[in-house]
Image (spheres, rainbow, N blue to C red):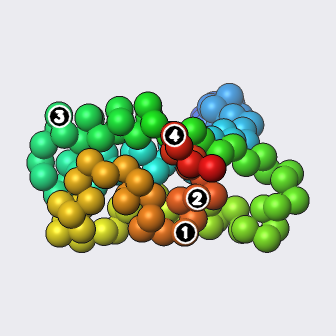
Amino acid sequence: MPAHRRPRLVWALAGVGLGGCKLIEPMPSDQPCKEVGWAIASRTHDCTGDVALANDRYEAFRDAAECIEWEADDPALEAVGAEDLFSCAFTIRNLPCETIDELGDDLPAWMEVDEACAWVVKLEGDR
């Protein structure tokens, strides 16, 4: 490349890089809970191949679940651990298909697969 063209290319790339940067936004306070609903739907679909059943289970979760919201500056996060808020969803995403079949549509049973589920989801009727 001729030397006289290099500066233009560098400035053009720098302009694209600067214009494309976004500020990092904090995670929504209900994100760990939403991940649980998505994990149930995803794992249901993975194990059954049934899109309608996966959607039905997600809708049932969304209708019955009250998300427990966590703020980044909540002092209780030090005791719980922010990464542990996603443990419920992680556990569900890794359940064997036999367990998915056993859990079926029993949403309270899904919430018992990991103690962290109680940290992010409250079901109707829970105290």
First-in-chain label (2 vs 3): 3
Q: CA distance from mark 3 to mark 1?
A: 28 Å
Q: Which mark is residue 118?
A: 2
Mark 2–mark 3 Cα distance, whole angstroms, equals 27 Å
Examine the rendering and report whether any part of residue 23 can be seen: yes
- Front label number (4 vs 2): 4
Q: Residues within 10 Å of mark 3 (few under 14, many from 20)?
A: few
Report the residue marked by disc 4.
124
Where on the picture, by quarter, is residue 96?
A: bottom left
Identified at 24% across, 68% down, the residue is 99
Q: CA distance from mark 4 to mark 3?
A: 23 Å
Question: Judging from the image, what secondary structure is the residue with disc 1 in?
Answer: loop
Dot 4 alpha-carbon crowd within 10 angstroms: few under 14, some 14 to 19, many 20 or more: few
Q: Nearer the viewer, mark 4 or mark 3?
A: 4
In the rendered structure, which disc, 1 or 4, sits on the residue that comes first in sequence?
A: 1
- Work out whether mark 4 precedes mark 3 in sequence or the reverse, and give the earlier one: 3
Question: What residue is at 12 percent from the left and 48 percent from the top?
Answer: 49
Amino acid bearing label 1: Glu
Between circles 3 and 1, the one closer to the viewer is 1
For marks 3 and 1 on the same chain, the one whose residue lies earlier in the sequence: 3
Quick check: 7 above or below 83? above
Q: Position of residue 66 (x, y in %)?
A: 57, 38
Measured in 3D between alpha carbons, the distance from the residue under mark 4 to the one under mark 2, in whole angstroms, is: 12 Å
64 lies left or right of 30: left
Question: In the rendered image, which residue does mark 1 sit on?
Answer: 115
Q: Which residue is mark 3?
A: 52
User: In the shown orientation, is residue 36 left or right of residue 100?
Assistant: right
